[in-house]
Image (tube, rainbow, N blue to C red):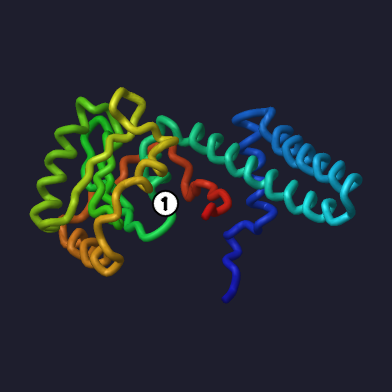
Amino acid sequence: MAKDAATPGRLKQIRMVAQIIKRSNPKGMPIVYASALGTLLVFVVLGVLFGWTWYVFGAFSALLVGMIVFSRLAQKAQYSLLHGQPGATYAILQGLRGTWYVEEKPVAVNRDQDLVFRVVGYPGVILVSEGPSSRVQRMLVAEKKRVQRVAIDVPVYDVQCGDAEGQIPLAKLSRHMMKLPRNLKKPAVFEVNNRMRALTPAVPMPKGPLPKGIRMPRGPKTR
């Protein structure tokens, strides 16, 4: 398959993310280098004491630690970049791992640019709002009624993303979604998503300064 010329290479992507980290936290990249170097020095000492094989382990361990720290700092930097911008919630939702169907455009929006996004996954249907609780609560209730008319006996969750009490901060949204109970099997998720698409078309995304094509970095998978 031909490579898309508009897609930057791996090294260029890493440099771009490193620049984002540097702008967000000038100490970020030195922390990455220090964590990798510190890990390597520990294994060098072990190599001196117990044999050269520890040097090999040290090289791989230093690279792994550096990658993990780099990924964590990149996430924090991009959360900071997204915070407060219209559609930031969608940028997080589209980066979810696993079987998730995220409606590309909000299913509800008001004059204040408060948004509601719809996600279908193993938990069922999840409505995720963006905006103050006093304004989005009515939007969530109305959209939940619409969903329940189509997805009968399917669990419907509503999640408010924001900084107010009782809301889920943007930086914790992905983790919160992943912790929801798995109520559906994969074929049922596909079927429910098809039923959701039968609802009225989603409303256009309001214009805002959200960077186009922004993707949240994914750290190493854990077992």
Q: Residue 190, image x and y in percent?
A: 27, 66
Residue 44 shown left or right of residue 64 in the figure: right
Number of labels in the image equals 1
Q: Nearer the viewer, residue 121 or 181?
A: 181
Residue 216 shown left or right of residue 7 in the figure: left
Q: Looking at the rendering, which quadrant does residue 128 occupy?
A: top left
In this view, the residue farthest toward the front is 50
Residue 8 shown left or right of residue 61 in the figure: left
Identify the residue at horizontal 23%, vertical 66% (top origin).
188
Q: Residue 94, image x and y in percent?
A: 40, 51
Q: Quadrant of the N terminus?
A: bottom right
Identify the residue at horizontal 64%, vertical 42% (top origin).
70
Amino acid type shown at disc 1: Leu
Identify the residue at horizontal 31%, vertical 45% (top origin).
205
In this view, the residue farthest toward the right is 48
Identify the residue at horizontal 48%, vertical 42% (top origin).
211
16 above or below 1?
above
Q: Residue 222, image x and y in percent?
A: 53, 52
Q: Which residue is mark 1?
A: 96
In this view, the residue farthest toward the left is 149
3 above or below 182?
below
In this view, the residue farthest toward the top is 165
Residue 111 shown left or right of residue 176 in the figure: left
Dot 1: element: loop
Q: Looking at the rendering, which quadrant does residue 160 occupy?
A: top left
Q: Residue 101, image x and y in percent?
A: 32, 58
160 above or below 97?
above
For disc 1, the neighbor class at 10 Å (few under 14, some 14 to 19, many from 20) is: some
